[in-house]
Amino acid sequence: MSGVTATLVGGNLIVTDNASHNALVVSQPAANEIVITDASASINGNPVGTPVTIKGVTSNVTLNLAANDSLSSGPTNPLMVAGNLVINGKRW
């Protein structure tokens, strides 16, 4: 599967998945830094399975999931959001 985009706008992170059955893992190894991984998807056009680090996340995190996606937070570096955490799911 492919089609995950991660965009930072004014400190707000927006992650959108356009394909179903992906397994996103979101973690936070440092303040204002979020890592997104998916073993079966390309994120921002990178090779499938390559983690993407977004720095400068200082406010809200919005996760727009596709049908039958799964979402988890890294057990070592759990997600701590400074603003709001919004998770939108889609059923097809």
Image (tube, grey):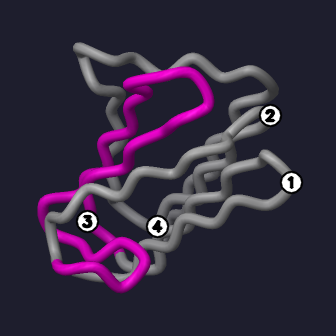
Q: Which residues are magenta?
A: 20-47
The answer to whether the residues at label 1 and label 2 have Cβ atoms under 8 Å apart is: yes
Question: Which mark identifies residue 59?
Answer: 2
What residue would you read off at disc 3?
21
Residue type at the position of mark 3: His
Distance, label 2 to label 4, CA atoms, is 23 Å
Instruction: Verify whether residue 30 appears in magenta.
Output: yes
Instruction: Verify whether residue 35 appears in magenta.
Output: yes
What residue would you read off at disc 1?
10
The answer to whether the residues at label 2 and label 3 have Cβ atoms under 8 Å apart is: no
> Residue at image x 19%, y 64%?
50
Q: Earlier in the sequence, mark 2 or mark 3?
A: 3
Disc 2: CA contacts within 10 A as few (<14), some (14-19) or many (>=20)? some
> Residue at image x 56%, y 54%?
89
Distance, label 1 to label 3, CA atoms, is 30 Å
Question: Which mark identifies residue 66?
Answer: 4
Asked which quadrant contains residue 32, the reply is top right
Q: Earlier in the sequence, mark 3 or mark 4?
A: 3
Distance, label 2 to label 3, CA atoms, is 28 Å
Distance, label 1 to label 2, CA atoms, is 8 Å
At numbered mark 4, what does the secondary structure look like: helix, strand or loop? loop
